[in-house]
Amino acid sequence: MLEEILRYIEKTGVISKTQISRDLSMPLNLVELGFTELTRMGFLEKDQPQSCSPSLCGGCTFAKSCHKDLVSSYSITEKGQKLINN
Amino acid sequence: MGKKTVALVGNPNSGKTTFFNALTGSNQRVGNWPGVTVEKKEGLFKYNDQEYRVVDLPGTYSLGAYSEDEVVARDFILTGDPDVVINVVDATNIERNLYLTSQLLEMGKNVVIALNMVDEADKLKIRFDLKKLSKGLNMPVVPTVAAHGKGVDEVIAEAVKLMDKTPIENPIVYGDRIEEERGLIRDKLRSKSLKYPLDWISLKVLEGDEDIISYLVEEGFGWAKDYTSDDLDFELELIDKRYEFMHRSIKDGVQRPIEEAVTLTDKIDKVVTNKYLGIPIFALIMFLVFQITFAVGEDLLGEMAAGLVESLAESVAGLLVAINAPQWFVAFVAEGVFGGLGAVVEFVPLITVLYLLMGLLEDSGYMARAAYVMDNLMRKLGLQGKTFVSMIVGFGCNVPGIMSTRTLDNKKDRMIALLINPFMSCGAKIPIYSVFIAAFFPKNGGLVLFSMYFLGIIVALIMGKVFSKTLFKGESSYFIMELPPYRIPTLKNVLRNMWDNVSGFLKRAGTTIFIVVTMLWILARVPFGVEPFSESSILGSIGHFISPIFKPAGFGTWQASVSLFAGIPAKEAVIATLGMVYAGVSEGAALENAIRLHFTPLSAVSYMVMTLLYTPCVSVLATVKKETNSYKWMIFTALYTFFIGWVMAVLVFQVGGLLGFS
């Protein structure tokens, strides 16, 4: 199932947990848990939003509004890619 | 004969401690597990005149070795010799909770499931077929509401029944590959008596459990280290098998209502992320945002703000004259503060409305879709999809827009994203467009504003494509975007987003812009003796010197030229300069009138295009230097954006002229 999730997101290039849940006929909670596991095991990597840099943002008047996590994204790691290719 | 022991396990927040309290009442004691700081709770309870010991194990999601809690829980189950394990499961989140259950099954213990909080699950319309669930999991499942003591006795009855029975066989099917390997491991371990069951150890070794592998190495089984290698990756397969078991077990036993939010998200996404409709819908939404922004922020509130600034300017000037303030100071306040700074501040309502609407889009989850539909286009252009995220951030300010490119791992993708970000129209340019729109296109404000933003995106994409084919060749890295379910925006988030942006704009007006305006005001009055704000002042001379460059673009006056020059320290200074050089103390409508005298509709468009695309402000250039660690790229950014802006402005003016526009 985890492998199935990984292959699905590699193929579609988008992570909509609801879409995965529907297309792979898996409960949504299980899909969410699957993501946690895939990330924990190093097959997926959650991209971290850039944190504020005190040296550059300290005096910036827009510092509060700039580092928004507008879109969460993941990358398939080398380990994940290896699994997909096998 | 000693008391029989019940171990209580469950996920955090499953109601395990409530269950423990319901079972033991005040008959409990708290201590610590030996050698660790994890709290140990145990108590006594009576059932059918028999007293039992119950141990409340730490709440965990799994029984690996990732935390002290997990190690304590699994060690007690395996070596503390409990007679039965009660697994408290949150009925509202059964899928997640069953992962722990699957690991308990692997430990070869008798387990009873206390399906807790069934009342909450009932409210969520989650239905359970307990018989099927129990059959699927191969263990008794008892519904409980521990908070009200419901079902606790029934769980104990089932637990007591199991105490002297042989533990059930692990029902998880692992497949031939894993079973063969497990067999080999078990055979190798039989030579010595170990503290954990062999069946369980064999699984943990295949899972690459470092704790167990270290234990085996200490016991003389050095070969166990080989299983930490990624090449022997049984871990995923093992976890997959647990998932399959969980999925199979709950398939018939649990029925969830089709979540309305999920269905709605799917329905909306089918339209807004459609291959053909996605981008036109995004464009339409942005168009509406700018229409509303202009209608409310400028036409309705903007005029009120302009009126306020104007009457404040008159009152302050009158007051300063009345108290015999020095003439230069009266002039500075009138021309510099109200003529310059006031011309910027009166656009606060417009910016407020724009960020309010953008906040609504962000908080609803739509912006992730916008990035997704643009991602497809970006990939076709050979650009990295995440570039568009940094472009959206650049709508507020290009400094964070450029900084957000740090999330791009690939240097090629990052450099392209960084170099095209200045084309995104930042908030500081809004006052410029607004003044020109009010002067020439009052009936089409939203459309013109939208066109400016749209043009910025188009130019950025074209330049991105050019860079990917010339300076930064190579493959783009790959990433996957998460589309969260839609939600109703919360007032708190939207207002906070709006306030962060508006307060940033105001703070900048009070600091950077004030300094820039003061310097420009001085430059407009020196050398002493010249007519202030004339061509003979230093400011006028600078404008006069550079104005020929802009003649082909239709705005080759010294005033327009010097305003663009002033925009390099900060873009807000463009309108502040125009306010000073054209209107002095009377901004607002008077500035618009002055602009009408010096520009035509065509040269106004050409000027707006120039301000949209030309050299970004010094803060952005400094960020380019900092992020690339290169003056070369900073200078390149300053020059190439100026060139693109100039070419586009000239094209607009010349082609527009040929087409009969004036």
Image (cartoon, rainbow, N blue to C red):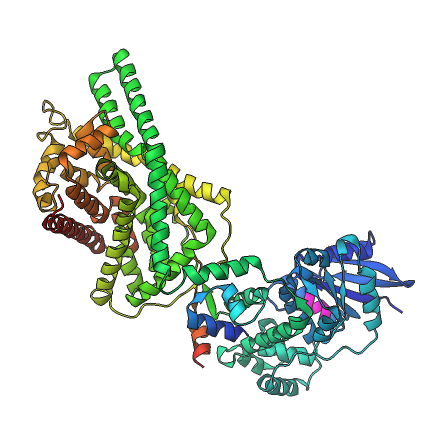
Which of these two is toward me, B513 or B354? B354
- Above or below: residue B533 compared with residue B367: above
User: Residue B236, how many percent across, how many down?
Assistant: 54, 75
User: Magenta segment: does it hold B76?
Assistant: yes
Residue B506 visible at all: no
**In this figure, what is the number of numbered marks?**
0
B583 left or right, relative to B73: left
- Identity of the residue drawn at 82% across and 53% down: B25
Residue placed at 34% from the left, 57% from the top?
Answer: B280
Quadrant of the drawing holding the C terminus of chain B: top left
Instruction: Pick whichever, B372 or B269, lies toward us.
Output: B269
Residue at 46%, 58% in the rendered image: B268
Q: Residue at 12% of width from left, 41% of height from top? A: B555
- Main SS of the magenta part reads helix
Q: Is residue B116 left or right of residue B210?
A: right
Q: Quadrant of the N terminus of chain B?
A: bottom right
Residue A12: say if magenta: no
Q: Which residue occupies the foreground of this view, A68 or B302? A: B302
Residue farthest along the right direction in this orientation: B49
Q: Which residues are magenta?
A: B73-77
Residue B543 x/y as whole percent: 12, 37
Residue B13 seen from this side: yes
- Residue B378: x and y, percent? 31, 63
* Residue A32 locus on image (x, y percent): 55, 64
